[in-house]
Amino acid sequence: MNRDASTSWARYRESTDYLAQGSSTSSKVPTIEGIEPAQIVRGRGCRVWDADGNEYIDFRNALGPITLGYGVPEVNAAIAGQLDNGIIFGHPHPLEGEVARLLVECIPCAERVRFLKTGGEAVAACIKIARNATGRNRILQCGYNGWINTLSLGGFQPVGIAASQPHNGIPPAVSALHESLPWADIEAWKAAFAEHGDDIAAAVVACNYAEMEKGREFLPALRQLTQEHGALLIMDEIVTGFRLAMGGAQEYFEFVPDMAVFGKGMANGMPIGAYVGRADLIESARSIGISTTFGGETLSLAACKAVIGFYRENGVIAHLWATGTRLWEEVNGRFERAGCSLRLRGLAVCPNLQGEGDAVARFMKACYGNGVSFYHVPYVNYSHGEEDVEETLTRIDRAISAM
Ligand SMILES: Cc1ncc(COP(=O)(O)O)c(C=O)c1O
């Protein structure tokens, strides 16, 4: 295998004269000089290719959105069919209501739906709705909810944030209203509610990858706590939606938040986000001024409709669980036998790769060198078949030896 990624690095470097950081997504900025593919030029099924012609079995999946695979014919046909009829109009297109109905059918808390383009924006919409509905100001937050995380000091920050600038463009008076709290530590949340309970508008929660199973106790307990204090619970399902279950963590862990945000996996890579929830809350969006020109863009809606149909017909969730369980158990066995500190922890559909010192970085480098594109949250998609799993394990064996 030719593992020289120099062409993609040369092109990437050239782009940085015009494109800040060479990428609009901070976590996609390549870091392993010459070995990591600095730019990807195409994908098919569960594989991607760089500009040098190197092929990789892909577990980055665009950092979450690819749940079915690259270039899935059913989704491509839906997008192409709609493209012929126009992308976006000056009035709503029927697909907007149709896809909203499909989401109401598969998401427990969804009585109403509205569309946006990114996950972070959907979180911001829910926060505004919660403040309006409760007449309160404070927001408690957990995990990564997009770059809006920079509102709260000490929270999980996007890659590349300058530690020397704790406020990062946020006025202190604003960040004083946003507090980050730990995953699955209900006592910490009780303490926060005891201190500021009558001014807390909402808790916004994204699950922790490595310790996701703790959500089974934590999330229903938090549901109860927010209700006791008259605050709203906003579930961030940007990663968990269409992976743990179609309806996300709320379906998997069996609780009903007031609102939830979905994005990433819902259209297999087409840019779409949704904020969903109690009818009175989502209905308030218009009267409090949440709106965007591109909300009803039809190519993404057509893709989303095709994706939901594909999930229902092909048992996608079961496939993600079965493939992830088999693959990651095998990989963890290899880590153990090799005597290294690396382990994949959490649930099979979105585990977290952890290790001591620089073990994770060294492993990812060895993976790139052997044709596996890994990530600290590696995802399987529906296109990872049995043969791909076998081939991945062979390549990972080589990567572990190379370390
Ligand atoms: C759990 C979670 N919430 C929200 C977001 C933000 O979504 P977006 O990048 O589409 O704004 C992300 C993005 O990685 C995420 O992982």
Image (cartoon, rainbow, N blue to C red):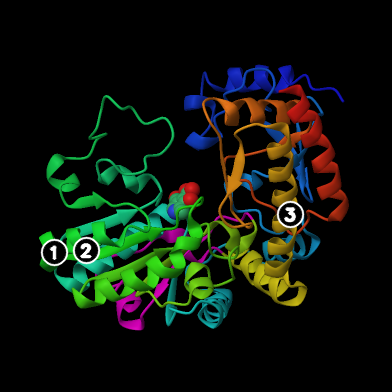
CA gap, disc 2 and disc 3: 42 Å
Give the SS element for disc 2: helix
Please tell me whether residue 137 belongs to the stretch shown in magenta.
no
Amino acid found under the numbered disc labelled 3:
Gly
Which of the marked residues, 2 or 3, is nearer the chain's N terminus?
Answer: 3
Tell me which segment is drawn in magenta. 269-297
Query: What residue would you read off at disc 2?
Result: 190
Left or right? Give the position of 270 relative to 286: right
Across and down, in percent, residue 153 comes to 24, 41
The reply to whether the residue tagged 2 has its Cβ within 8 angstroms of ligand 1 is: no
Asked if the residue under mark 1 is in contact with the one under mark 2, i.e. CB atoms within 8 Å, the reply is yes
Across and down, in percent, residue 135 comes to 14, 70
Which label is found at residue 194? Answer: 1
Point 70% across, 21% down: residue: 35
Q: Which image quadrant: the N terminus?
A: top right
Query: What residue would you read off at disc 3?
Result: 69
Point 61% across, 36% down: residue: 342
Label 3 neighbour load within 10 Å: few <14, some 14-19, many 20+: many
Amino acid found under the numbered disc labelled 1:
Ala
- As displayed, is residue 174 above or below residue 102? above
Left or right? Give the position of 251 relative to 35: left
CA gap, disc 2 and disc 1: 6 Å
Across and down, in percent, residue 47 comes to 78, 43
